[in-house]
Amino acid sequence: MAELMIDAKDVTRNFTISRGMFRGKQQLKAVNGVDLTVERGEVLALVGESGCGKTTLAKVLLGLLPQTSGTVELCGQPINDVPRLALARTIQPIFQDPYSSLNPRKTIGSIIALPMKVQGIADQDSMRRRVEETMDLVGLPPRLYDAFPNQLSGGQRQRVAIARALVNRPQIVVCDEPTSALDVSVQSQILNLLNDLRNELNLTYIIISHNLAVVEHIATRVAVMYLGRIVEIADTDTLFKDPQHPYTRALLDSVLTPDPNMGIPNNQLGASYPNPIDPPTGCSFHPRCVNAMPHCATVAPNGKADGGHYVECHLYDDAS
């Protein structure tokens, strides 16, 4: 049986939102009852529109935000019981924008070495050796050790961010749009690097991305989020060949094609987006769903799992 690295059950994360000076406050459920498992060595992609809760869920899994309810276990331990330094040794983030996630006043060597300093696990000489070893691992030449971020290209900066995340050899890496700020020609280099590092270091990835081409290239399993819930999970080949949830199909239909004769795709989602502070009753997707049935507006669907394929939709609900 595969080893579970992350086991999240019924995870909810609420934020208190002000409605105005005289209207009081209201709860926003950014993550709403998510069940999720991640096994050692796999690459799980979280996809969905902006505001669906992907980054909030990732922050909960990183231990940066406490969950409002539910449980998260990291390598078999409740995440709230794991000491902060031990948590940082186990799971690390790679942020979206390498231009803003690196301190412009620090050298590349000191940026990569910072996690080791925080952990206090190496002297100056061994720290430099580990940093240079990690730089070589991600394809950065030693001459950049004393350089500053503004002297590097975007691709090199992202390699620095990857090296900083890997210098303490974590087991899990959370990548929040790791290639979106890069040129297309550089994106493939970073994706191939992440794949090589995964194989070499036996890493487990959680990838947040809007780019479905990136997801199809790198992910082994895909979780589709909508308004704080995971509405479909399947292995990558299955999800791209046989998407079952109407929202998943709409996402795949929205991908642009290089053929100019195909025009701009119509995903039939419309221009409006539901208010997360006041979500629709029943199935949260029903106001935008082309397959909506009358009871979708009042009854929330039960999730149905067929092997490794999970979908939350009345179209596949035995009780519908």
Image (cartoon, grey):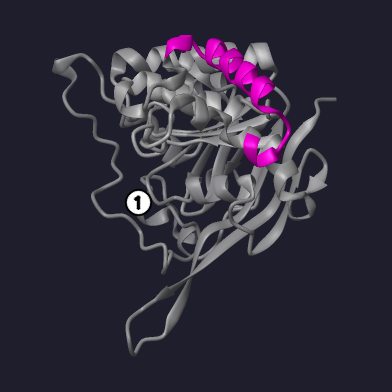
Name above or below for residue 288 compared with residue 28.
above
Would you identify the image quadrant in which residue 66 lies? bottom right
Magenta segment's dominant SS is: helix
The residue drawn where x is 73% and y is 33% is 121
Q: What residue is shown with label 1? A: 288
Residue 190 in the image, given as x and y percentages of width and height: 44, 17
Q: Residues within 10 Å of mark 1 (few under 14, many from 20)?
A: some
- As drawn, the residue found furthest toward the front would be 124
The residue drawn where x is 48% and y is 11% is 142
Name above or below for residue 320 compared with residue 279.
above
Q: Is residue 165 left or right of residue 141?
A: right
Residue type at mark 1 is: Arg
**SS label for mark 1:** helix
Q: Is residue 153 left or right of residue 109?
A: left
Q: Which residues are magenta?
A: 117-143
Residue 99 in the image, given as x and y percentages of width and height: 34, 34
Name above or below for residue 28 compared with residue 311.
below
Q: Is residue 270 left or right of residue 135?
A: left
